[in-house]
Amino acid sequence: MAQADSTPQEDVDYLWAWADSRPTLSCALWQDTADLEKAQERKLERIAELAGVRPGMDVLDVGCGFGGMLDHLVRHGGARSAHGIDPDGYQCREILRRATPGVSVDCLPYAAFRPTRRFDAVVSISALEYVTGSGVQGQREEVTALRDFFLRAHQWTKPDAGLAVEVVVIGPKGLDAATQQKGRDMLEEATQQSSGRPPALPNILAAAQGLWELLSVRTHRQDWVRTLDAWHSRATGAREAISARWGAKAYDATIHYLALERETFTTGRLSAAHLAFRRTGEE
């Protein structure tokens, strides 16, 4: 019998049914591979490279999710420590359950974080969308919200620290309010969690001005489309198992959300960007 009253968003098995083994719920990089697991590993490698992570560093992950990046940093990036912050209690508990040596986590919003040390590098995957909030904002309000993130990251880090960000941004075609609201509603139906608001790329750059020197920026819209295709394929292949354990409604909501996301990226309403920065200032 389907468990219609279950909560798949709080069951990592549900995510494993259609995402990768970590699970990494963000854009994979598909160069030289057709395998989702390898493509997500390549993305983690790339983010670490953009942040300038080297052996012996102490690294902060803002919006660490289930901790796949944290594990990668200490196991493959040579980091001495990897500390995550995330407001989601279930995701934090999953990190604590794994108890990876060198990994730690604080379960709180980034604005409440008060570190007792400064970090050599910062990474952030799919967190800036939540910094701007879900409400409709003008350019000034969006830049102000984003600047708060960059200012705090500046305060948390040592001179010349690296910062690597992956963020979903408004695409070349622009995102109309109706499509944005539809996506927000479908995400909340699929996960029972509030959604973020993709910022405009120029606003991110304006917010970092004077705090972080931009080193590189590259968009990965087609990689996101391919990631969504992979998730959709895995989910449809696991339809019976998902429906039996979490209910047909959970399966349908997931499929509909992935299809809408694919449409918004394919049509250019949304895109994804990787940005690398270097901290300015000697203090």
Image (cartoon, rainbow, N blue to C red):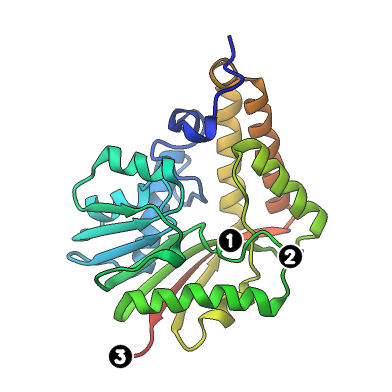
Instruction: Tell me what residue is drawn at x 72 percent, y 44 percent.
Output: 185
Residue designated by label 2: 136
User: Quick one: label 3 or label 1, which is nearer the N terminus?
Assistant: 1
Residue 227, image x, y percentages: 55, 44
At label 1, the amino acid type is: Glu
Q: Distance of mark 2 from mark 1, alpha carbons?
A: 13 Å
Residue 20, image x, y percentages: 44, 37
- Name the one closer to the observer, 274 or 8: 8
Q: In the drawing, what numbered circle is on residue 129?
A: 1
In this rendering, which labeled residue sits more in front, label 2 or label 1? 2
Residue designated by label 3: 282
Mark 2 neighbour density, 10 Å: few (under 14) some (14–19) many (20 or more): few
The answer to whether residue 253 is left or right of residue 95 is right
Residue 24, above or below 278: above
In this rendering, which labeled residue sits more in front, label 2 or label 3? 2
Instruction: Tell me what residue is drawn at x 67 percent, y 32 percent.
Output: 253
Image quarter for residue 79?
bottom left
Q: Distance of mark 2 from mark 3, alpha carbons?
A: 36 Å
Residue 132, image x, y percentages: 61, 66
Q: Name the quarter where the N terminus is drawn.
A: top right
The answer to whether residue 250 is left or right of residue 24 is right
At label 2, the amino acid type is: Val
Q: Distance of mark 3 from mark 1, alpha carbons?
A: 29 Å
At label 3, the amino acid type is: Glu
Label 3 near label 2: C-beta < 8 Å? no
Image quarter for residue 215?
bottom left
The answer to whether residue 159 is left or right of residue 169 is left
